[in-house]
Image (tube, rainbow, N blue to C red):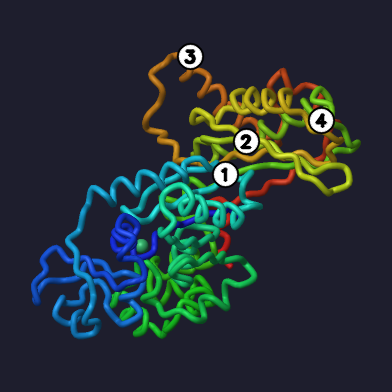
Amino acid sequence: MPKVLHLDMDSFFATVEQQSRPSLRGRSVGIAPVDSPGGTIVAASIEAKKFGVKTGTKVAEARELIPDIVILPPTPNKYRVVHRRFRSIMQEYRGICKPRSVDEIALWLEPSEWDRASEIGVDIKQRIRDEVGEWLSSSVGIGPNWLLAKTACSIRKPDGLLEITEGNRRDILAELDLTDLCGIAGRMAARMNLAGIRTPLDLHDMKPWELKHRLGIIGYYWHLRLNGYAIDTEDWATKTLGHSSVLPRPTASPEDLKPLLHKLCHRIARRLRQDSWLAQGLVISGSMADWGDRWVHSVKLNPTQRRDELFQTAWGLLKSRPPAAPLRKLAVTTYNLRPANPKQPSLLETDRRTHSALIGTDAVNDRWGEFTVIPAAMMGTEEVAGDAIAFGQDLRLQRETLDS
Ligand SMILES: [Mg+2]
């Protein structure tokens, strides 16, 4: 499953003030642009929140709740400096890093990092304390798409770390209200209630066609999000498409693996063209003969849907970092897919001609069966491996869920 990591600094403005002025640590602090009774608190420290002061509380009311609360004006420059510093820590990890606001950053991890997502979360939280400021606490949520990562993050604040997995997803959603989901506000929740949907678990569990009937396409989209599908534009980064194949004889030799690598790249390029995606990253991985250790390497790509470009990259990786032990299974995965714009053909004549040749071979293979027309480089690969297995989350899978 793809892994997105969402980080949210706890009580950001107030915590940054406490970081820069140690005498404020452990005290109730409210940030208000205007320190007058009618002024509004825009951020409250973790301590002040415990007494009920939050964003939107009036200064007079905050003083009633906490007589010794410290009210400070915001210092945006300080917040920007801290933002840049924790952002540069997050950018050191393999993946795509996108700020969502001054105190929230999402990281779409590369496939090679999916296994260690929560380790990375722990690591980032600690490094922010060590390298930016010891008082700066943050919360991290991990999930298969951004919405679930953000939801996980909001549940364990402050100083939390929670991963929503296939195993705990239903239990977690059962504890939430519809409005706890980012993107569902009062009016949408009311509309859902009218349609008989009361909790996020209803959206998760109800049959897709039933939701579509009750709420329109929006209901279907919420169902997909809560079930972990990457359907929002920000999640294109985690969209993957790959193929794998079991080897008839385990081998660690790049030359022996080469024909299979050709075949896997060919199939992926074909699916990329079929579904109009450009791949911007590639991972080769393998299972060792004892099914124990995994061998994984990834690299960024210039956006492509061409077999030869995928192959050159994959082959380069395989030659420079061959597996240490014989592989039993080889996989190639492309990731960080973005929609290809078919209306925007390349200006280069050679590119255009290659593209029409590819579309032509695709058509022949569609009609007469896969590998009827193959690139010369793939001659003789037929015996190397049986049929490759397709995997990855794509739009077709989503269409299938709607039909079920
Ligand atoms: Mg925050």
Q: Which residue is mark 2?
A: 298
Q: Which residue is mark 1?
A: 110
| Circle 4 Cα neighbour tier, 10 Å, few/some/many (<14 / 14–19 / ≥20) | few
Cα distance, mark 2 to mark 3?
A: 29 Å
Cα distance, mark 4 to mark 2?
A: 26 Å
* Observer-nearest of 183 and 119: 119
Please tell me which of labels 2 and 3 falls first in the chain: 2
Quarter of image, ligand 1 = bottom left
The residue under label 1 is which amino acid type?
A: Glu
16 on left or right of 76 = right
* Observer-nearest of 127 and 208: 127
Q: Position of residue 64 (x, y in %)?
A: 19, 85
* Observer-nearest of 204 and 60: 60
Placement of 125 over or under 353, stated as above or below: below
Cα distance, mark 1 to mark 4?
A: 31 Å
- Residue at 40% in and 77% down: 178
Contact? badges 2 and 3 (CB < 8 Å) = no
Contact? badges 2 and 1 (CB < 8 Å) = yes
Please tell me which of labels 4 and 2 falls first in the chain: 2
| Circle 1 Cα neighbour tier, 10 Å, few/some/many (<14 / 14–19 / ≥20) | many
Q: Which residue is mark 3?
A: 350
For discs 2 and 3, the disc positioned in front in the rendered view: 2
